[in-house]
Image (spheres, coloured by chain):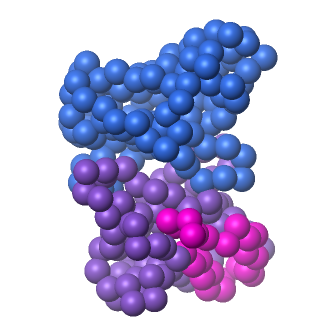
Chain colours: A blue, B purple
Amino acid sequence: DGGITQSPKYLFRKEGQNVTLSCEQNLNHDAMYWYRQDPGQGLRLIYYSQIVNDFQKGDIAEGYSVSREKKESFPLTVTSAQKNPTAFYLCASSIGTEAFFGQGTRLTVV
Amino acid sequence: QKEVEQNSGPLSVPEGAIASLNCTYSDRVSQSFFWYRQYSGKSPELIMSIYSNGDKEDGRFTAQLNKASQYVSLLIRDSQPSDSATYLCAAAARDTGRRALTFGSGTRLQVQP
């Protein structure tokens, strides 16, 4: 089955810790994206990558980092510099401008 | 002005009625528009895309784009309780160097049995 897989589904982070969210796709899409969603709000763009070994900051990149070493993978690290990381994180990939999402990772700071 | 704006709702309609969801956009986004459905606690699912002025129909869904008014809408005919969800309007940036979509905050639809 083709699709986008995010893991883990739920993640708990202690204050001051870095955590990495995984995103893998087997759709052969060139572009991949990370969005953040807070309760009652739309999606805000964190980072995006249009080709391997290249990525750009989105609207809320501070406190986050990414890498794109393989076409299939686009992991997101939430660093300790991100002061309010509790949110629903969504990874997407696209062909053209139609984007398709993984099932999301819900991150909670404890 | 936000790039993509939606009324947060909730929009409540009786089962079998037509639900009309609306979205306005700024000049900073392009003419490519998308509607996503998001059930509570789940990820968004693409249900419609529209690229040119006019109407596009797919089953019970019709997307309408009016470029002159910078307005895009989604009509859901014969609404069912299973249509109860948040509907997100999204647009591609006019700057083609950034292909990532910009999203509205979503409209919550409630279909009453």
Percent of width and height locating residue A29: 24, 40
Compared across the picture, whether B18 is left or right of A25 comes to: right
Provide residue A23's location: percent of width, then percent of height. Answer: 41, 26
Tell me the quadrant of the picture where the N terminus of chain A can be found.
top left
Q: Residue at x 62, y 81 (%)?
A: B19
Seen from the viewer's position, the closer of residues A51 and A71 is A51
Question: In this view of the protein, can residue A71 be seen by the observer?
Answer: no
Name the residue at 34% across, 69% down: B30
Residue B14 percent coordinates (x, y) = 74, 81
Q: Is residue B101 visible?
A: yes
* Picture quadrant of residue B5: bottom right
The image shows residue B113 at horizontal and vertical percentages of 77, 74
Up the image or down, B4 lies above or below A19; here it is below
Q: Is residue B54 left or right of residue A80?
A: left
B76 to B4, vertically: above or below: below
| The magenta stretch spans residue B2 | yes
Per the rendered image, the range of residues in magenta is B1-23
**Residue occupying image coordinates x 62% and y 24%:** A82
Task: State which quarter of the image contains the C terminus of chain A.
Answer: top right
Q: Residue at x 56, y 35 (%)?
A: A89
